[in-house]
Image (spheres, helix red, strand yellow):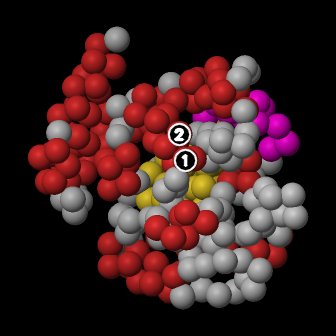
Amino acid sequence: MSASRQAIKRHQTRLRQCARCPHMTGPPVTGNAVVSPVLLVGQAPGPKEIESRKPFAWTAGKTLFGWFSQIGVEENVFRAGVYMAAVCRCFPGKTPRGGDRVPSREEVDNCGQWLQAELRLLQPKLVLPVGKLAIQQFMPVTKLDEVIGKQYRVHLEKGTADIVPLPHPSGASPWHRVEPGKGLLQRALATSPLVSFSLVLGLWLVLNNIPGIRRMRQEGFRQSFLRKSLKDRRV
C-alpha cells in the first residue's frame, strides 16, 4: 500500500534539511507532495531550480513539458499529478569550462537514499527517468540510443514498475533534436505506458481530489486534456 500525502510531506521536510554534500549548492529541490503512481526522476537541479525551489523550472523544463504536451498532458496537470524526484536534489555547480558538474559517486549515493525512500513510499507503477544519469539508477546504459524508445519492466524493493527512459531536455545537448534521437524520443512518447498515462491522468486527479485541480479546470486545462485524449483514442 502506498504512502499518505502526510507521509510524503514529512519525507520532503526531512529532505529539504539535508546538507550531506559540502560541494553541492542547496537548498534541496522537491516537487509537489503528491501521492502518485507515476514517478519522474531527473538528474540534478540547475541554479534556476534552486532559486525557484521547483524542478525543471527553466529552459530544460520548457522542453520537457513540451514533450508531455504532445501526448495531451500540460505542465500544470503534470506537476499536480506526478511525483517529481531527481538523482541529486542540489545543484552540483559548474566545471572550470562552464558546464554543469557531474555529481560524484558519493553524492549520488548520498542522495540516492532519498530516492529509495520515495520508491518505497510511493510504490510507483510508471517511472520516467530523464537523462543518462537517471536511467542508470534503474538499468545499465552506455548509449542513449540503446534504451530510448523502449519500455521496460523492473523489480523494485516493493513491487514492479514500467520504466520509459527519456533523454535529458538540456539545450546544451542536441541529442533529442537530431536523428536518431529525435525519432527515438517520439517512439518513447508513443509507448503504451505513456499513452495510458496520458489518458487516465486527468481522471485520476479528479478522483483523488488533488489540490489545485479545481483551479486547473477553471483555466481550461482539464477540458483541453480530455479533448486531446479523446482525439488520440479515436486515432
Question: Of all residues shown, which one is farthest toward the top?
Answer: 235
Residue drawn at (75%, 85%), measured in percent from left and top?
A: 22
Residue type at mark 2 is Thr
Q: Is residue 158 visible?
A: no
Q: Which residue is mark 2?
A: 63
* Image coordinates for residue 99, horizontal then vertical, percent: 79, 56
Residue drawn at (40%, 75%), measured in percent from left and top?
A: 8
Q: Residues within 10 Å of mark 1 (few under 14, many from 20)?
A: few
Q: Quadrant of the N terminus?
A: bottom left
Q: Residues within 10 Å of mark 2 (few under 14, many from 20)?
A: some
Q: Nearer the viewer, residue 56 or 133?
A: 56
Q: Is residue 93 above or below residue 138?
A: below
Q: Is residue 19 above or below residue 100?
A: below
Check disc 2 and report its element: helix, strand or loop.
Answer: helix
* Disc number lying in front (2 or 1): 1
Assess whether mark 1 and mark 2 are in contact (beta carbons under 8 angstroms).
yes
Check disc 1 and report its element: helix, strand or loop.
Answer: helix
Numbered label attached to residue 46: none
Check residue 74 for magenta coloring. no
Numbered label attached to residue 59: 1
Magenta range is: 141-151
Q: Quadrant of the C terminus?
A: top left
Check residue 150 for magenta coloring. yes
Q: Is residue 38 left or right of residue 156?
A: left
Residue drawn at (57%, 24%), measured in percent from left and top?
A: 186
Magenta span: predominant SS is loop
Q: Quadrant of residue 83?
A: bottom left
Residue drawn at (17%, 34%), measured in percent from left and top?
A: 223
* Image coordinates for residue 73, horizontal then vertical, percent: 36, 38
Q: Is residue 9 above or below residue 210?
A: below
